[in-house]
């Protein structure tokens, strides 16, 4: 983490240093990582905002404190050095006053609380980063499976144009049926996902077809793609749904963290991490916030087509990632 970011938050940098960070925040290649670090620092120092105000001490507090200390500390005489340890005097209420021990315990408790308050956000940040890294590694394995399918079929898995199986998440049962991924290998759920608690398994295409028309089918189409969305393909000028053929385009997404209800971003990772699998097999991880969504939808909206709809793309360059149940 860059130490100058702390100075940036506290407005303690000189003009040149602050200008360098402002320039980096405007650079698409570096802004995502810097914004992530700034967000982590802001969460870490947020508890300090509670101490911004000045608390006026009660009148006479200092005098009363000194008097209490003098009263609690026994007066030592030359002869007392040869005697054994003495107990602190007993107050009128009968309680033993041990000011030094009490103060030490108070300082220790305060230090412990401060450590927890300051370190907990950083520990959570490290945990989320580890989960995101694990998710990226899993998606890399899925990307290999998709590349293998495309090599064998001359196209990526594509849902049918119509019918009950016309769903974005059909890619997962298709890969399972061809034994390119295992139904229970956990590649399609991110670490910490609620689906982990449900012992999620990807159904095979045969199991999905057998469940058509039942309540089980409606449940399966909602989760069969795991926590990730998949390309809905595109329609040609005649309106026919066309599959994505592997042109090894490094800019064309075919899979990503599934969109949430807003259709603007994914809520899989609290820190704003988004994973995108591209046609050439590359897996990218970027961080976005509500104010930097344009980084997620740079040249083409990730979750909507050129008409602003969750549907198949309007042309071959219009990529749309749909959630498991979405139809082209």
Image: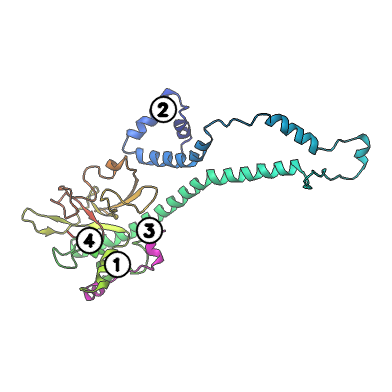
**Quick one: SS at disc 2?**
helix
* Residue where numbered disc 2 is placed: 18
Label located before the other in sequence (3 or 4):
4
Label located before the other in sequence (2 or 1):
2
Q: Are marks 3 and 2 in contact (CB under 8 Å)?
A: no
Q: Are marks 2 and 1 in contact (CB under 8 Å)?
A: no
**Quick one: SS at disc 1?**
loop
* Residue where numbered disc 4 is placed: 168
Residue beneath the point at 68% across and 31% down: 61
Per the rendered image, the range of residues in magenta is 190-211
**Which mark is on residue 307?**
none
Q: Residues within 10 Å of mark 1 (few under 14, many from 20)?
A: some
**Quick one: SS at disc 4?**
helix
What's the distance in space between the residues labelled 2 and 1, CA to CA? 50 Å
Which of the 4 image quarters holds residue 102? top right
* Residue where numbered disc 3 is placed: 190
Residue beneath the point at 36% across and 69% down: 184
Q: Is residue 147 left or right of residue 107?
A: left
In the displayed image of the protein, which residue is found farthest to the top? 15
């Amino acid at each position: 983490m860059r130490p100058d970011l702390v100075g940036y938050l506290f407005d303690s940098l000189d003009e040149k240093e602050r200008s360098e960070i402002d320039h980096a925040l405007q650079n698409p290649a570096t802004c995502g990582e810097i914004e992530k670090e700034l967000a982590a620092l802001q969460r870490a120092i947020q508890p300090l905002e509670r101490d911004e105000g000045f608390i006026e001490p009660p009148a006479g507090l200092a005098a009363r404190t000194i008097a209490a200390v003098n009263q609690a500390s026994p007066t030592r005489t030359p002869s007392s050095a040869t005697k054994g340890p003495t107990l602190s005097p007993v107050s009128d209420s009968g309680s033993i006053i041990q000011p030094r021990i009490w103060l030490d315990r108070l300082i220790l408790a305060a230090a412990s609380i401060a450590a927890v308050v300051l370190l907990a956000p950083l520990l959570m940040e490290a945990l989320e980063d580890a989960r995101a890294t694990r998710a990226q590694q899993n998606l890399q394995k899925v990307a290999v499976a998709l590349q293998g399918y495309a090599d064998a079929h001359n196209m990526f898995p594509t849902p049918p144009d119509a019918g009950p199986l016309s769903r974005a998440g059909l890619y997962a049962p298709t890969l399972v049926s061809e034994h390119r991924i295992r139904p229970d290998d956990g590649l399609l759920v991110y670490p910490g996902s609620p689906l982990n608690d449900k012992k999620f398994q990807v159904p095979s295409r045969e199991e999905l077809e057998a469940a058509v028309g039942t309540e089980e089918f409606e449940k399966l189409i909602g989760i069969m793609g795991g926590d990730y969305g998949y390309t809905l393909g595109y329609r040609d000028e005649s309106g026919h749904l066309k599959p994505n053929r592997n042109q090894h385009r490094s800019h064309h997404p075919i899979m990503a963290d599934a969109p949430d209800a807003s259709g603007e971003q994914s809520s899989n990772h609290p820190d704003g991490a988004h994973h995108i699998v591209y046609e050439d097999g590359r897996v990218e991880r970027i961080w976005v916030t509500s104010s930097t969504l344009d980084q997620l939808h740079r040249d083409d909206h990730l979750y909507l087509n050129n008409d602003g709809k969750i549907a198949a793309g309007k042309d071959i360059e219009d990529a749309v990632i749909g959630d498991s149940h979405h139809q082209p």
